[in-house]
Image (cartoon, grey):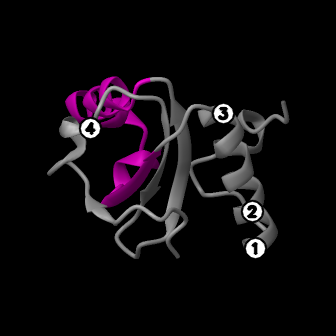
């Protein structure tokens, strides 16, 4: 289940070579199931931190095998829409997104 129009990319291989632009990203597990929908003002900084720290001991995100990303000027709004669409389609949140993190603007 791919959530973005961006091609699926292998994690680590290209994660550090993302432009430092605002954007939304989706992390996928080995089964290509979306496990996390995130947003940031700087994809390069966020991805470099994830790669360098191996997700800071976050066991859920450590299951990441691939990702998609898209640059957008309103990452928070786009993230909320993706999460809402995912929940409406599946009845659940992605496994690494908790309901606490998802607050409507």
| Horizontal arrangement in the rendering, residue 96 relative to residue 93 (left or right) | left
Closest to the camera, between mark 3 and mark 1, is 3
- Figure quadrant of residue 18: top left
The span from disc 3 to disc 2 (Cα, nearest Å) is: 14 Å
Closer to the camera in the image, 83 or 65: 83
Q: Between disc 2 and disc 4, whose residue precedes?
A: 4
The CA span between labels 4 and 1 is 29 Å
Q: Which residue is mark 4?
A: 18
Alpha carbons under labels 3 and 1: distance apart: 20 Å
Q: Residues within 10 Å of mark 2 (few under 14, many from 20)?
A: some
Q: Are marks 1 and 2 in contact (CB under 8 Å)?
A: yes
- Give the residue drawn at x 33%, y 26%: 20
Circles 2 and 4: CB distance less than 8 Å? Answer: no
Mark-to-mark CA distance, 3 and 4: 19 Å
Q: Which mark is residue 1?
A: none
Determine whether 96 is above or below 100 in the image: below
Residue 89 tag number: 1
Report if the CB atoms under discs 4 and 1 are less than 8 Å apart.
no
Vertical position of residue 44 compared to residue 96: above or below: above
* Mark sitting earlier along the chain (3/1): 3
Magenta span? 42-70
Can you tell which mark lies on residue 76? 3
Marks 1 and 2, Cα distance to the nearest angstrom? 6 Å
Tell me where residue 7 sits by quadrant.
Answer: bottom left
């Amino acid at each position: 289940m791919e959530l973005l129009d961006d091609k699926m990319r292998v994690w680590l291989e290209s994660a550090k070579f993302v432009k430092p632009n605002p954007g939304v990203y989706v992390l996928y597990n080995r089964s290509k199931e979306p496990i996390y929908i995130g947003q940031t003002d700087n994809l390069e900084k966020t991805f470099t931190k994830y790669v360098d720290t191996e997700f800071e001991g976050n066991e859920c995100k450590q299951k990441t095998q691939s990702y998609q990303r898209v640059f957008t000027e309103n990452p928070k709004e786009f993230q909320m829409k993706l999460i809402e669409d995912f929940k409406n389609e599946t009845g659940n949140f992605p496994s690494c997104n908790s309901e606490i993190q998802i607050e409507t603007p």
